[in-house]
Image (tube, rainbow, N blue to C red):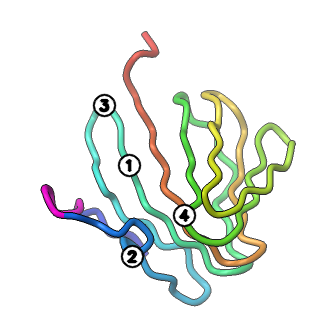
Amino acid sequence: MMDYHEIERAKTLIVIEIIEYISNSVVMKSIIKKSTGNITAFSFDKGEALTEKIIPFDSFVQIIDGRAEIVIDGISHLLETGQSIIIPAHSSNIVKANERFKMISTIIKCGYE
């Protein structure tokens, strides 16, 4: 399930409430989406994962609820609520939900010239 509508501007948010859990799903909601980068909220139900990918930009991932497993170039990182990690550009990565969790992903696409 994907929602490409951005969050309303100049409105106070409770970050954990930006996105809901849906059974057997990964849910994605754009907070800001621009050609220069984007900020996206995700919720993962237990057992769900994103397919392995490599992107040409650094990605800053913040866990806002629960616990996530993020595998970068074959090395597993277990993150809990409040923890963050930078997935380096051009690195193989997989995001897994051994239990349900929510995260914010920030990707900045400029500055790589």
Q: Is residue 28 above or below residue 99?
A: above
- Image coords of residue 29 (percent x, y): 37, 65
Residue that carries the numbered disc 2 in the rendered image: 17
Residue drawn at x 31%, y 57% as measured from the top left:
31
Q: Choose mark 4 or mark 1, whichever is in front.
A: 4
Q: Is residue 30 above or below residue 110?
A: below
The residues bearing labels 4 and 1 have C-alpha atoms spaced at a distance of: 14 Å
Circle 4 SS class: strand
- Image coords of residue 98 (percent x, y): 78, 73
Residue that carries the numbered disc 4 in the rendered image: 64
Residue drawn at x 54%, y 61% as measured from the top left:
103
Q: Choose mark 3 or mark 2, whichever is in front.
A: 2
Q: Predominant secondary structure in magenta?
A: loop
Residue that carries the numbered disc 3 in the rendered image: 36
Disc nearer the start of the sequence (4/1): 1
Circle 3 SS class: loop
> Is mark 1 in CB contact (under 8 Å) with mark 3?
no
Q: Is residue 14 above or below residue 112?
A: below
Q: Choose mark 1 or mark 3, whichever is in front.
A: 1
Neighbor class of circle 2 (other Cα within 10 Å; few <14, some 14-19, many 20+) is: few
